[in-house]
Image (cartoon, rainbow, N blue to C red):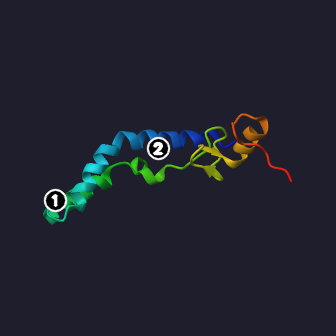
Amino acid sequence: MAKKSSIQKNLKRIKMVDRYAKKRDSLKKIIKNKKLELSERFAAQLKLDKLPKNSSKVRIRNRCGITGRPHGYYRKLKISRIALRDMASAGKIPGITKSSW
């Protein structure tokens, strides 16, 4: 089980990304628009820099929904490999059985 503070910090980042998504997108469009003047684009870059760092999508860490483990994460299932194995062994995931040969 991951530290509760790490899990809460990641949840806080997810909420912040949702809150600032529209603002970040509009500023990035202005920055990438080569038809605008350099001063306008530079001003948009300064505004983007003033936004909180945790409002950036790349700062979100994929964590297991059950244990909070950050490594061995399956994106489709949103759980870690260890939680997947435990659930498969318990028969909680349909269509998955533990292999033996």
Residue toward you, 49 or 11: 11
Measure the C-alpha gap from mark 2 to mark 1.
29 Å
Residue 42 screen position, x and y as percent: 21, 62
Total count of labels: 2
Q: Residue at x 39, y 40 (%)?
A: 18
Q: Quadrant of the C terminus?
A: bottom right
Question: Considering the numbered disc 2 on the image, is that residue within a helix, a strand or a loop?
Answer: helix
Q: What residue is shown at x 69% (from left), y 36% (from top)?
A: 94
The residue pinned by badge 1 equals 40
Q: Residue 3 at x, y = what percent? A: 65, 42
Residue 13: mark in rendering: 2
Which quadrant is home to the N terminus?
A: top right
Where is residue 67 drawn, in percent x and y? 67, 40
Residue 25 shows which numbered tag?
Answer: none
Is the Cβ of the residue at disc 2 closer than 8 Å to that at disc 1?
no
Residue occupying the point 43% across, 48% down: 54
* Type of amino acid at the residue the image marks with label 2: Arg
Crowd band around label 1 with a 10 angstrom C-alpha radius: few (<14), some (14–19), many (20+): few
Disc 2 packing (10 Å; few <14; some 14–19; many ≥20): many
- Determine the residue positioned at 34% across, 45% down: 21
